[in-house]
């Protein structure tokens, strides 16, 4: 098992390296000229050229990548090599945004808490709601409980997030004034305002995602409830509650865990639309402004962070597999 | 004679589908006494497995139409509330299934599955339950049971898994064990030892057994009485020696004639029963077996095609569902089975 873990961690590092290369090459191929973009209003060809050298964009992509990687581990300066007016970006340096005059890491660090809270809260909500309704629907298959749960799930599944978000925002906050207009604060600073702000985004995301988990859980349960070992569990004299809640649910858990892990990772990379609708200062809204502005170093940073979350989530999901299914442990 | 512990009376099980009701079991009756073995024989789709699962109350009463009576130790399983049923299942009556590869939960250690079976029905500590589990595994012939108890099902062979299933079914010393084709999925050599194990446990525990099978060799080995099922109904029932010596229903004859035999010309083809099992949604009119019965033309007035024969006794222990007159049936049986050495071993 520990050997497996070491191998997986090595693979994780390798994937991160390959991924950062791909991201770097991809963004360097964009027609946008960062030197031009970070130039400002009173722009002359000379300033652009000076910017280009300052940003290190006069070098080849390979050299730029090397400086970038070095920056992550040892920090870097703008321009490369230092100088009296050089900007210092300490390790781990993911780049510097000249549009916002801050390091990319600073920018992401400021935005990460809101995104993490949003993602975690929504995740707990949609997993619990999705799995409970899914199990219920499977148990009452074909009866009105099943039909109404699946009907609502279909509705939730097909609503676009911008629509649902705006409708909820409009009615709950603007029309009925049930909650104050969202304004993010840290939960450690003002828990009440935090919950009042996060409640609607959590619910909106939960509705959108829970629908998928309801359907997934229901179909998994229906499949496992037909298995021979479920009949064995019943033949032992186990009450139906235990048969379903223990034997069937555990057997059907694997795909739910997979999807859950990846969804959580995706949300940690920023729920772009929901964050924008509820003006949450998260990674998603940072990404939107970096696209609109455009601010390439920030985009590279966000892409890498998101990818990092997905890769780590994959690893955790695989480890959870082994915890759920003993046959995986042997194969590993 | 021991007391009757199970009596099935006119059991009917139908599954409503979009195409109509699948009448899987259509009026089945039989009795079973303590310590005896009843074999239910029939091809796939004859209703034998559904009958067995109804006895344990494993058929979902919401999705199936079940009627008739299954009286087990004086209580009617069919009308019993779920909670009462949970107390009987696994404790007083239990079941082993056809495919040991898929009948154990793949995610739990076999010890955990056995301990669970003990602790549903007995107020004992986990440690005591574990000791019982190890003891039971030892009894069913699992070597190094105290280590094997912590294995997962995938670490055991098919035969070992079936032994675990048997251990799990018998761990609460039930009065009734239903074995639904317990050896079908196993190697021939393993089959014999599993059957031996079951009969040995029956003798020490005085368990009544219902053995569901389509293997007449198994029937000859273990059964006291035989019920032959076809298309959801009992077509013949008799003590095992009589089924092999004087089968009366053409379907039973067909089953006996289709067994491969070592004492016959190896190049000779087997004698299968022509045709296919009947549709259970729209069964043939008259005798369910008539489309495949080669003797149907021996009955006057096309009664085989128009009138369902009743299951009538030909002796106090032998009943047959057939329109052909008894004397003629015996003649048919004699000529069809002439030259065959009936029965494997000593059926008595």
Image (spheres, coloured by chain):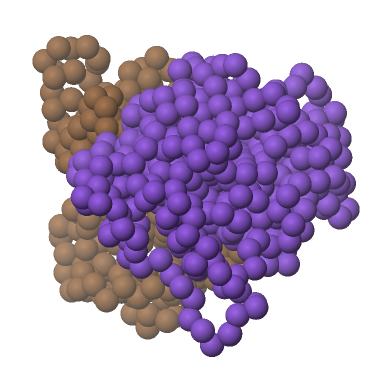
Chain colours: A brown, B purple
The answer to whether one can see residue B324 in this image is: yes
Quadrant position of residue B124: top right
Quadrant position of residue A144: top left
Image coords of residue A332 (percent x, y): 65, 64
- Most extreme residue toward the front is B327
Above or below, A52 against B72 in this view is below
Image coords of residue A264 (percent x, y): 42, 44
The answer to whether one can see residue A48 in this image is: no
Q: Nearer the viewer, residue B229 or A83?
A: B229
> Is A294 left, or right, of B100 in this rendering?
left
> Is A326 left, or right, of B201 in this rendering?
left
Q: In percent of the image, x 43 and y 30: which residue is there?
A: B11
Q: Which of A234 and B237 is in front in this view?
A: B237
Q: In percent of the image, x 84 and y 30: which residue is there?
A: B127
**Placement of the N terminus of chain B among the 4 image quadrants:** top right
Image coords of residue A127 (percent x, y): 41, 35
> Is A46 left, or right, of B73 in this rendering?
left
Image coords of residue B99 (percent x, y): 58, 54
> Is A314 left, or right, of B239 in this rendering?
left
Above or below, B341 against A306 in this view is below
Above or below, A178 against B177 in this view is above
For the image, the number of numbered tags is: 0
Q: Nearer the viewer, residue A313 or B219?
A: B219
Q: In percent of the image, x 82 and y 52: which residue is there?
A: B142
Q: Which of A320 and A316 is in front in this view?
A: A320
Q: In percent of the image, x 18 and y 18: which residue is there?
A: A173
């Amino acid at each position: 098992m520990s050997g497996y873990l070491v191998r997986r961690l090595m693979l994780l590092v390798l994937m991160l390296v390959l991924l950062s290369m791909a991201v770097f090459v991809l963004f360097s191929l964009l027609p946008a000229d960062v030197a031009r973009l970070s130039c400002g209003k009173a722009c002359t060809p000379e300033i652009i050229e000076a910017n280009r050298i300052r940003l290190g964009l006069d070098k080849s992509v390979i050299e730029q990548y090397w400086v970038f990687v070095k920056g992550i581990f040892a920090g870097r300066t703008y321009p490369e090599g230092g100088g009296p007016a050089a900007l210092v970006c300490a390790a781990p340096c993911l780049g510097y945004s000249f549009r916002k005059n801050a390091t990319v890491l600073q920018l992401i660090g400021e935005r990460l808490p809101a995104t993490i809270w949003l993602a975690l809260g929504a995740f707990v909500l949609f997993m619990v709601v999705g799995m409970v309704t899914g199990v219920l629907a499977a148990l009452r298959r074909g009866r009105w409980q099943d039909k109404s749960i699946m009907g609502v799930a279909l509705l939730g599944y097909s609503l676009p997030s911008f629509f649902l978000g705006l409708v909820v925002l409009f009615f709950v906050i603007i029309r009925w004034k049930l909650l104050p207009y969202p304004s993010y604060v840290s939960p450690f600073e003002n828990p009440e305002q935090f919950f009042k702000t996060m409640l609607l985004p959590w619910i909106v995301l939960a509705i959108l995602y829970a629908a998928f988990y309801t359907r997934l859980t229901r179909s998994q349960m229906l499949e496992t409830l037909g298995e021979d070992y479920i009949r064995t569990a019943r033949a032992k004299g186990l009450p139906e509650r235990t048969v379903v809640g223990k034997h069937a649910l555990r057997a059907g858990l694997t795909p739910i865990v997979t999807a859950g892990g990846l969804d959580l990772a995706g949300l940690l990379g920023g729920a772009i639309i929901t964050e924008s609708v509820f003006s949450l200062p998260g990674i998603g809204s940072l990404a939107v402004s970096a696209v609109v502005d455009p601010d390439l170093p920030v985009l590279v940073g966000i892409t890498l962070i998101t990818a990092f979350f997905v890769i780590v989530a994959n690893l955790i999901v695989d480890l959870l597999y082994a915890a759920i299914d003993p046959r995986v442990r042997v194969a590993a | 004679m021991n007391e009757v512990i199970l009596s099935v009376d006119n059991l009917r099980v139908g599954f409503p589908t979009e195409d109509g009701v699948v009448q899987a079991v259509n009026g089945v009756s039989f009795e079973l006494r303590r310590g005896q073995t009843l074999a239910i024989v029939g091809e796939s789709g004859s209703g034998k497995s559904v009958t067995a699962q109804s006895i344990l109350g494993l058929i979902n009463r919401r999705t199936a139409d079940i009627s008739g009576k299954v009286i087990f130790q004086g209580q009617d399983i069919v009308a019993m509330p779920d909670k009462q049923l949970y107390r009987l299942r696994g404790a007083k009556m239990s079941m082993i299934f056809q495919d040991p590869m898929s009948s154990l939960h793949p995610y739990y250690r076999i010890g955990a599955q056995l301990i669970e079976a003990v602790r549903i029905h007995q107020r004992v500590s986990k440690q005591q339950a574990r000791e019982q589990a190890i003891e039971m595994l030892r009894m069913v012939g699992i070597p190094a049971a105290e280590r094997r108890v912590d294995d997962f099902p995938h670490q055991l062979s098919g035969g070992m898994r079936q032994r675990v299933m048997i251990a799990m079914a018998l761990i609460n010393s039930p009065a009734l064990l239903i074995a639904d084709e317990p050896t079908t999925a196993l190697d021939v050599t393993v089959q014999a030892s599993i059957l031996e194990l079951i009969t040995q446990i029956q003798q020490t525990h005085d368990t009544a057994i219902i053995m569901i099978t389509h293997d007449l060799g198994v029937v000859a080995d273990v059964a006291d009485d035989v019920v032959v099922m076809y298309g959801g109904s009992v077509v013949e029932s008799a003590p095992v020696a009589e089924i092999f010596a004087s089968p009366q229903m053409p379907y039973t004859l067909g089953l006996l004639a289709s067994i491969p035999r070592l004492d016959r010309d190896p190049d000779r083809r087997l004698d299968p029963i022509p045709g296919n099992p009947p549709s259970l949604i729209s069964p043939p009119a008259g005798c369910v077996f008539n489309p495949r019965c080669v003797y149907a033309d021996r009955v006057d007035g096309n009664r085989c095609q128009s009138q369902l024969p009743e299951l009538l006794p030909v002796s106090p222990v032998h009943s047959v569902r057939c329109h052909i007159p008894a004397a003629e049936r015996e003649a048919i049986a004699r000529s069809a089975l002439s030259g065959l050495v009936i029965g494997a071993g000593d059926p008595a």
